[in-house]
Amino acid sequence: MSDTMPIEQYLEEGGVLSSPDNVPPRYRGELLRLMASFVDSELAGSAGFADTINDAPGIQERISAARIVLEKADHAGLVLKIMETFGVDGARYAVHHPWAERLAREADIGAVRQGGDMRLSVFHYPLEGWVDAVVMNVLMGSASVVQLKEQSRVSYQPLAEVFRTILPRERRHAELGAAGLARIVADDEGRVRAHASVTYWYPRVAASFGHSGSARFETLSRFGLRHTPNETLLAEWQADVDAQLSALRLN
């Protein structure tokens, strides 16, 4: 970076930062917020899905569920290591909140964060059995892939590299969910239960993309921490999941 170029201009023009030592205070705050949201969502997602492992109908399904639980916790750990370089106490952070805690099933909080952590709002809702967990995994798995493709372009290079490592694993989680859902809808009872879960989870996952025309997007864009508006990411997700649901006659 040129000594005379303002850092926002440098970042807007595609510049990257690689060390906590050259990160300005406002950028640091937004970067830590982004990382905390990811870590908290992965920890909450892992904790919530862990409770469904024993609901799995077979050995292969149990293995798939356990893999998702393990890897989501690992993803949180990878990003938490970067947070530690900014002074975060990683050991305390990982246990400071009851990650399996959920609101009532009928709650409707939109995109508003709740409680003492930064998880996406969708991870405040409880799962109800195996079919419900698979449907949520399919819908949120697709959303995670869309969001990670965006996050893999962040201007903080160490974090971008970690997100690029995580992306194919989260894509595999979505694929495991899709395969499981295809087996569920093979009979009429499974299709009815899956359709009810789609109706419940679809708007809640959609809300995780945030508001259209977000004012914060402009700030994050100047820092190179965001590139694509919320509404564009939402539309990409909708196109993907609508095609999947249509193929299964669930939309």
Image (cartoon, rainbow, N blue to C red):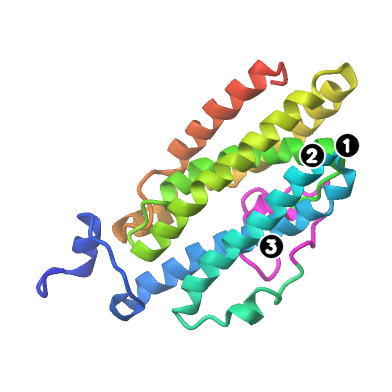
Q: Position of residue 111 (x, y in %)?
A: 62, 51
Q: Quadrant of the C terminus?
A: top right
The residue at which mark 3 appears reads as 114
Most common SS among magenta residues: loop
Q: Secondary structure at mark 3?
A: loop
Look at label 1 and name its amino acid.
Pro
SS for callout 1: loop
In the image, is residue 201 part of the stretch drawn in magenta? Answer: no
- Which label is found at residue 106? none
Q: Which residue is mark 1?
A: 57
> In the structure shown, which secondary structural element does the residue marked by tag 2 occupy?
helix
Q: Which residue is mark 2?
A: 61
Q: Which residues are magenta?
A: 99-124
Mark closer to the chain start, 1 or 3:
1
- Distance between mark 1 and mark 3 Cα atoms: 33 Å
Q: How many numbered badges does the structure rendering display?
A: 3
In the image, 132: left or right of 141?
right
Up the image or down, 180 lies above or below 51; here it is above
